[in-house]
Image (cartoon, rainbow, N blue to C red):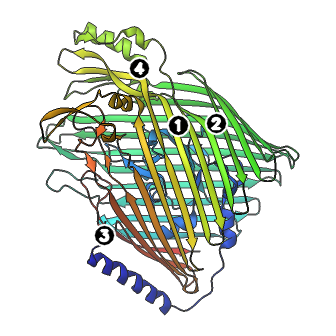
Amino acid sequence: MILSSDMCKYLFISVLSFIAFAKAVAQQTVIDSTATEKLEEIVLTATRTERQLSSLPLPVTLISKKNILQSGTIRLDEILNEQTGIITVSDESGFEGVQIQGISSDYILILVDGVPLVGRSAGNFDLSRITVGNIKQIEVVKGPASSLYGSEALGGVINIITEKPKTEKLNGNVSYRLGSFTQQDINLDVKKRFDKLRIGFFANRFSSNGYDLSPETGGQTVNPFENYTFNTRLYYDFNESISLFTSARYYDQTQDAGFTFEDIEYKGDSNEKEWNAHARLDHKWDEKLSTSYEFYYTNYRANERLEDPIEEDAFTDSDFNQTLIRPEIRANYKLESAGTITAGVGYQLESLDRTYFDERVDFNSQYVYGQYDVNPTEKLNVIAGARFDNHSEYSNQFSPKLAARYQLSESIAIKASVGYGFKAPDFRQLYFDFTNSAVGYTVLGYNVAVDKLNDLQAQGQILDVVVPLNELDDPLEAESSIGYNLGMTFKKGKWNSELNFFRNDFKNLIDTRIIARKNNGQNVFSYVNFDEIYTTGLEVNTSYKVSDAIKLSAGYQLLYAFDKTQEKAVEDGNVFVRDAQTNQTVAIDRSEYFGLVNRSRHNGNFKIFYDLKKYKANVNLRLLYRSKYAQFDTNGNGLIDSYDTSFIGGYVTANIAANKTFYQDFNLQVGANNLLDYTDNNIPTQPGIQGYIKLNYQF
């Protein structure tokens, strides 16, 4: 995509105006941030121990607070979408989930300070629930991480780490941002240390009037909403060896859910509430042994009611209430000149009460894991680990992982890893009982399918059963994968680059299948293990420091994602389509099989950061590219091919932000996302250009 002349002028004038404004302000020196940046390179998620990012044998992306602030992003989905190999994808509800190495949101574990968030009504986790206002850094581990984190870490882990109070002086910031569509974001972050006690408090309000990409149809693409996030953190050092961390987080969102259907204007709203409570006692016994005792509770609730305001008939009335309780004990032991052993044991109790369940459902599981991190030689680092999960609803899981890094020279290192990941069948796949009243089809969870089908037969609703019911006797298996990564890093002078090849093979993926036909012509669906897919490709990241003021970075991902069964059927000539031009039925050629839905073959980014330290100002431009992808099969042959019409063409988005600090404590930021004004009615999260202005006061 080429910038129009008007866009070029707008961009050029905006940058020149900002630089002129910066130079007009009195010159002040700034503290060099090298030491801070080095501290921010410490990561925790990949090994559950503190490690330098550059020393890890695993593919990990670190997003620092500095990058978050400079980019002007305010929600988690926005900042993740700017990283190489990480794509945010909207589901049918408009929620944005994350995709890593072609692996969908269902298989990516989301953590805050090392503990998981819940609330996936259909597998997808809504990343816009998370504000980045009090985040120290974001760590993204790519590829299977079940050896440490268990289920849902099949495709990777995203850990959001909040800031810890450091100084005895009351400090923090308050900010206000106003953007397009009356989007408002307000932050208050306060931190203070009292000798042994440290306290942090954070509050955020985020709201928007929404927007409409299809004015010709009733309702809005995104309805008006407002949400609040509150987070209190407390740290207490009993002595040099024992410390306590506690955190409480609350999230509340209300959104207008009204829409028009068949000339009836339904009105109502949806509400989400989330509670997290986290306590951890850390004990350093001596220089070799440290232990942590952790307790975590979280609850997510969502409800939505829509009704005809005249007839007062409910169109939808749904509730969702999920709870997770998890105690865990873990330990780190440093062997004398022989590496570090990390071990943990824990228990999880999950419950879900929702519409379309007969009653509340409870899961429980016990797990134990261990990891050995060792440097056999000065240049070689090896990490070997495994986890065992015993679950009440599916067979036991053993998840091993092996990773190694070798320093070939002062500038070049190679790293490789192989790991097993799994995802447990979720509540919906096991206990769902839903009948679409308008269309008439039924979806039954695997564990209740036989009993519910017998009930439907007794009611005279079933025409015939198309699968032997004894096929539903064995438990639904956990989905699993084996992931491979092979990479190389290069760091010398002003260059810092990384190349990573990856492959993920999945089996036992859970999908729906027809188990019976109803008298009304509709079907009864349930779930089954049968899909086998793979994702493979490469990622490249590179950065170059042109000068102390200018830094360039670029990233690219090549991705191939295919269903193995579909691939073989195409190669055997067993998949057909009607050619619209010749009106003939033809077999799909292998080159015409595109792959899985919502996967782009190419993704890339290019970023320019211009830092005017002398004037306490900076400007950055980020260009993001995504090649074409398909949203669903349109010709009915069960796969995505070149004859389908749901493809969204490749596009470029551009985001720009400019920051200026004045009077020492005030920071003004102006910027625009989607500067090229790209829109597509099929992408509800792309409403066109979004300008904003933000004022932040640091105290």
Image quadrant occupied by the N terminus: bottom left
Quick one: SS at disc 2?
helix
- As measured in the structure, the alpha-carbon distance from the residue carrying label 1 to the one carrying label 2 is 11 Å
Is the residue marked by circle 3 packed among few (<14), some (14-19), or many (20+) residues within 10 Å?
Answer: few
Of 566 and 121, the residue lying toward us: 566
Q: Are marks 1 and 4 in contact (CB under 8 Å)?
A: no
Quick one: SS at disc 4?
helix
- As measured in the structure, the alpha-carbon distance from the residue carrying label 2 to the one carrying label 4 is 27 Å
Residue 71's place in the image compared with 228, above or below, is: below
Decide if residue 690 is on the left or right side of residue 127. left
Q: Earlier in the sequence, mark 2 or mark 4?
A: 2
Res. 446 mark? 4
Residue wearing tag 2: 147
- As measured in the structure, the alpha-carbon distance from the residue carrying label 1 to the one carrying label 4 is 19 Å
Rendering coords of residue 686 (x, y %): 31, 58
Residue wearing tag 1: 152
